Image: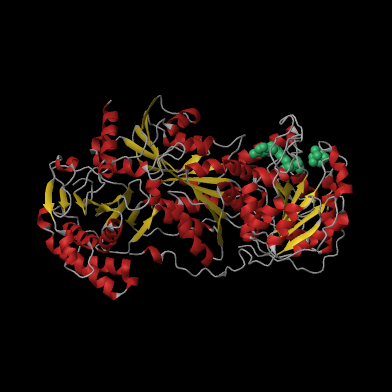
Amino acid sequence: MVRRMSVAAPCKLKASDYKSGTKPVWCPGCGDFHVLASLTKAIAALALVPENLAVVSGIGCSSRIPAYLNCYGFHGVHGRALPLATGLKVARPDLTVICAGGDGDGFSIGGNHLLHACRRNVDITYVVMDNEIYGMTKGQPSPTTAPDWDSELAPGGTGVSPFHPLVIALASGANFVARTFAGDVKGTTRTLAEAIGHPGFSFVQILSPCVTFRPDQREWKNKVHPPPVTFTTDPAQAARRVMTDDGFNIGVLYKGSRDIYGQAVERNAEFERDLDAEFLV
Amino acid sequence: MTGQPGMSFSVALLGKGGAGVITAGDMLLAAAARCGLYGLMIRAVGPQIRGGESAALVRLSSVPVECLDDRFDVVLGIDWKQAEQLLSEIAVDADSIVVTDPAEDAVPHSIAASGAVLRQLEMKELAESVSGGRVNMVALGYVAGLAGISQEAIRHAIEKNIGRKGRQAVDVSVAAAMLGFSRSQRSAAPQTGGGQAGNRWMISGNHATGLGALRGGVRFAAAYPITPATEILEWLAPRLKDAGGTLTQAEDELASINMAIGASYGGVPSLTATSGPGLSLMIEGLGLAVCAEIPLVVVNVMRAGPSTGIPTKPEQSDFNAAIYGLHGDAPHIVVAPNSVTDCVYTTQWAVHLAEATQAPVIVLSDQFIGQAIVVADPVPAISFFTKRKVAEEIPEAFERYAITADGISPMPLPGTAGGQYTADGLEHSAAAKPSGIASDHSAQLDKRARKIADFDYGQHWADIEGAGELAILTWGSTASVVREALQRLPDKVTGRLKLITLRLLLPVRQEDMAAALDGVNRLLVIEQNHTGQLYRFLRAWYDLPADVDTVHRPGPGVFRPGEIATRIDAWCGE
Ligand SMILES: Cc1ncc(C[n+]2csc(CCOP(=O)(O)OP(=O)(O)O)c2C)c(N)n1
Ligand code: SF4
């Protein structure tokens, strides 16, 4: 089994050193540019060694992010980023694993995995760039889209209420829950660094405007505000707060201390069991 | 008694759930092994989750056996409560002995009409005469006696099976078994030939699959339960841990295959196991492993389909799904074990192939092979020398998906400085950048096809036996039945016959096949499914003799040697 721990000598890289140099496919003004900036700053602040970091994603505009980073990456299939990240972290606990994607990827096609990733509490950080839309497929409603939002696929709106991803995450056992706004690079950087540093499954919803299909989201910068109170360690209280707020509270909402999956397992480095002997009659 | 050249003795033990017929069958097999015999057992169950009728179908032999016989020498019913459904699989005739308890209902009509010899055995009464005694132990002693198994071997098998329950429990069971043993009239029953006592293994195909995976170096498994594959995962769970690996239970098969892909991307040989419905869910993940070039083993223990089908019964009907299920041009490898014990070898080989080619390998096992337990000679460990081609030193201008002569590109593992790249299911350039350019697409398609097509599969692609101008081509669990059928046919038939058992179903081996079919002018393809899936595949991809016939029928009943021998005999005479 691979256990190649690179020397974690203080890594003196600048945020820009964590960019791969590949030009993003994103539209000018897309909120995901800010997420990329915040993520590289957070990683630089934590002095993570690029080869010991892996970023795993699914499919969507936002899911393109691994290719823009200087680290190991996996751009998998739509909706399955969390299980892939889970397998990688369980097999390689020495790595820092971040999972990223959009609201369609994470809440719709991959929704079930979110519940179980929260419940399992593997030590990974999940970043969802929520633009309340399917961007890559050119503007269809997602599980966080308002019921009256008009689109070609749902003329006049879906008539279906959006769900509360943060409440779902809290109810399912996520160990760290936060919401940020992409345009607030400073706050997002700080929150991402905290989320990555927090043990267990950390969930960060980043409100990240899709300027092309949701030009109305340019207004978000005027709507977001810090929560009236600081984070809690009581999931029920955090859930109540998120369910009753205006959806624009940003900051850390909840920090937990649950047991982490895979770390209680004792590992025998030596292969001791005589497998052949157990079949002898 | 049938089965050549060795002697063979088949017993069916029936009883409602809780009666313990499966335990008795297990012990019978272990006791026979102790006496130097070989054997095989399958459990047949009705549709109830618990409490329904079940049967242990046991076959003992002086030579290794890997399939059921056509008929049963002895059928013992602890009761016949819901036996009808199971009896369709249990043929009896005038030479069979049927054992029944006078305290229970009369034997079912189909058995009574067979002309079999009826024997009364007061199993309940005998069991009750020992404090704490159970009927299944009386039954065990009785049939073991009929089979010519020694008292010492019965005692040993009981001790081994329930020894952990303490001395008292063992003594009670032995006492009950000896009562049954003393009642068996051995002289009137078929005797088994005296095999050579020696080291024997008792192993199921699913456990053999787990063993092959561990021997091959698998250290991560992702699991979602499904009949009849679950035992692979349950067997692996504690043993992987001991080996310094892990098994993670997933929320569904979409998750399990992606977990295995993630772990393998991290450098740890990985596996997941499933059956038809799970394979369908895993198809997108298999395509991802093809495109991103991630080694991966998916064991698919086939059951009768489509959809939920018949979960507890075998069929070789996922062939098309395994070969053609993936969208796009997606070269991958499909292998099939051809016996219970071959699961060890074929699974280990699958891990080797996955690691060496950086591609997904599907292992097509089936319910019969997977859940049958055999007494067999130990399966020796073999080692393969090809390992994953890992990029340890990263040169300047490194390209993850570099175009190489053999199509295999060195793969950096996370943690390797300078090797950072993004594995991608999007088409990409050699440098692992997403690309929709025609030249990148064709270069990567060619490379991925080449590494699978040009790999050296050696002699393992097929097992070839015999020689002649007639050939039979088969695969999977059907192979053992065909092998035994051939042993029953006269030399003047088999002397003209060659048997080709495919272990490598994909990629196609045109040259190897041409060599194997050299001098063959007629070919018969035998498989267990409704449409002749392998037959049609062969016709599409291989140069075959002009005269090709097919024998195929669906499950749930497994082929029996007599049935196949008749078909082969008729075909040879055409
Ligand atoms: C299995 C599958 N179904 C559908 C698609 C098409 N598809 C690609 S991206 C996407 C939605 C992306 O939306 P989101 O995850 O919110 O990301 P965004 O583009 O908004 O960042 C869909 C439906 C796909 N790639 N795979
Ligand atoms: S479509 Fe929307 S989400 Fe996608 S890149 Fe453009 S602005 Fe960003």
Left or right, B434 with reference to B314: right
Q: Nearer the viewer, residue B307 or A214?
A: A214
Residue at 33% from the left image edge and 46% from the top image edge: B46
Up-down relation of residue B230 to residue B305 (above or below)? below
**Image quadrant assignment for residue B235:** bottom left
Q: Position of residue B247 (x, y in %)?
A: 54, 59
Q: Residue furthest bottom?
A: B167
Is residue A213 or residue B475 the one in the foreground? Answer: A213
Colour scheme of the picture: secondary structure
Q: Quadrant of ligand 1?
A: top right
- Residue A202, visible in the rendered structure: yes
Q: Residue furthest right?
A: A222
User: Where does residue B453 sit, x and y in percent of width and height?
Assistant: 57, 39
Q: In the image, residue A80 lies at what x, y percent?
A: 65, 47
Location of the N terminus of chain A (image quadrant):
bottom right
User: What percent of the width, then of the height, locates residue B4?
Assistant: 23, 46
What number of labels is visible?
0
Foreground: B570 or A233? Answer: A233
Which quadrant of the figure has residue B187? bottom left
* Rendering quarter of residue B515: top left
Query: At x 43% / y 51%, what residue is drawn?
Result: B343
The residue lying at 73 percent from left, 47 percent from top is A101
Residue B330 appears left or right of B346: right
Placement of the C terminus of chain A among the 4 image quadrants:
bottom left
For residue A198, side relative to residue B268 (left or right): right
Residue B456 in view: no
Q: Is residue A74 above or below residue A227?
A: above
